[in-house]
Image (cartoon, rainbow, N blue to C red):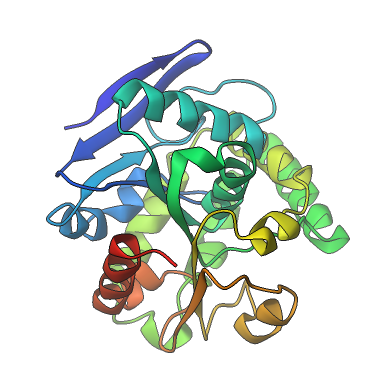
């Protein structure tokens, strides 16, 4: 059962289970907290695990025309303060990683560490911005459903599509339920986000960076060459995963994350 945090701009849905070191999961674009189903529950046997629907997603309210990464990081900060958790370990998947980097930038003292899960600290390229603008037009024309079959299946490694057919179908269902205005708001927010490479390189907060060999969105070899990682950062490459390693290689991901949360850096 979930609960609602009543923010000054609207309500935010979250779940809170387990005990111990607090860990908060931040989902990606076209996702909700439901994407962590199974993974978060297993981790809640070891830690206090909080999941949330970002503004404009799932059961959370739309907070404005633009959901910037900073705005969403600020809402998460307010939620964490309200829960009296003290510093948390934050896990951000894909777009959730952009929100996490904004949190690292703005509230480093509220973190024991963070994990970028199939994500990166860079701003959008001109090509990415053009793609998002095209998606905004598609959504505004009432055709958001046309994005899902292709975009969702590309999140998984090709060799995993049959094995995780149920997870692919579930991801499509989750995406279909996200309101059009919520999609547009985060697309605009992603387009305007700044690069936070220097924040990652400064190493004020220990970082676990999980990448997938078969990720069609992030080239795991080239992306690492663009960041001078600090000594308290660790990279984990999931050799049989695309963009959804917490599903595609769940047990390895759980093990790696558990060890890092207990001993960050």
Residue 97, image x and y in percent? Answer: 55, 54
Residue at the image position 54 percent from the left and 48 percent from the top: 100
Residue 233, image x and y in percent? Answer: 53, 70
Residue 223, image x and y in percent? Answer: 68, 77
Residue at the image position 37 percent from the left and 83 percent from the top: 160
Query: Is any atom of residue 91 visible in this view?
Result: no
Residue 110 vs 36, above or below: the answer is: above
Q: Quadrant of residue 15?
A: top left
- In this rendering, the count of numbered labels is 0
Left or right, 61 with reference to 66: left
Residue at the image position 57 percent from the left and 63 percent from the top: 119
Residue at the image position 84 percent from the left and 63 percent from the top: 127
Near-viewer residue (206 or 61): 206
Residue 84 vs 136, above or below: the answer is: above
Near-viewer residue (158 or 34): 34
Left or right, 139 with reference to 56: right
Residue 239 vs 132, above or below: the answer is: below
């Amino acid at each position: 059962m979930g609960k609602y945090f009543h923010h000054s701009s609207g309500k935010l849905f979250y779940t809170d289970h387990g005990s111990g070191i607090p860990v908060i999961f931040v989902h990606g674009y076209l996702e909700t907290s439901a994407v962590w189903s199974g993974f978060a529950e297993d981790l809640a046997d070891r830690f206090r695990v909080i999941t949330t629907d970002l503004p404009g997603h799932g059961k959370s309210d739309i907070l404005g025309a633009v959901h910037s990464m900073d705005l969403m990081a600020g809402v998460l900060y307010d939620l964490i303060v309200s829960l009296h958790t003290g510093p948390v370990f934050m896990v951000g998947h894909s777009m959730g990683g952009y929100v996490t980097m904004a949190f690292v930038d703005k509230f480093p003292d509220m973190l024991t560490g963070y994990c970028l899960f199939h994500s990166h600290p860079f701003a959008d390229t001109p090509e990415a911005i053009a793609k998002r603008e095209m998606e905004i037009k598609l959504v505004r024309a009432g055709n958001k459903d046309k994005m899902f079959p292709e975009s969702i299946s590309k999140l998984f490694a090709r060799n995993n599509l049959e094995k995780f057919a149920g997870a692919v179908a579930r991801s499509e269902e989750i995406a279909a339920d996200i309101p059009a205005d919520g999609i547009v708001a985060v697309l605009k927010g992603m387009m305007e986000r700044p690069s936070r490479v220097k924040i990652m390189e400064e190493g004020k907060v220990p970082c676990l960076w999980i990448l997938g060999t078969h990720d069609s969105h992030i080239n795991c070899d080239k992306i690492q060459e663009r960041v001078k990682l600090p000594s308290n950062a660790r990279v984990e490459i999931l050799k049989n995963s695309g963009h959804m390693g917490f599903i595609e290689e769940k047990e390895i991901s759980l093990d790696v994350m558990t060890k890092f949360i207990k001993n960050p850096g």
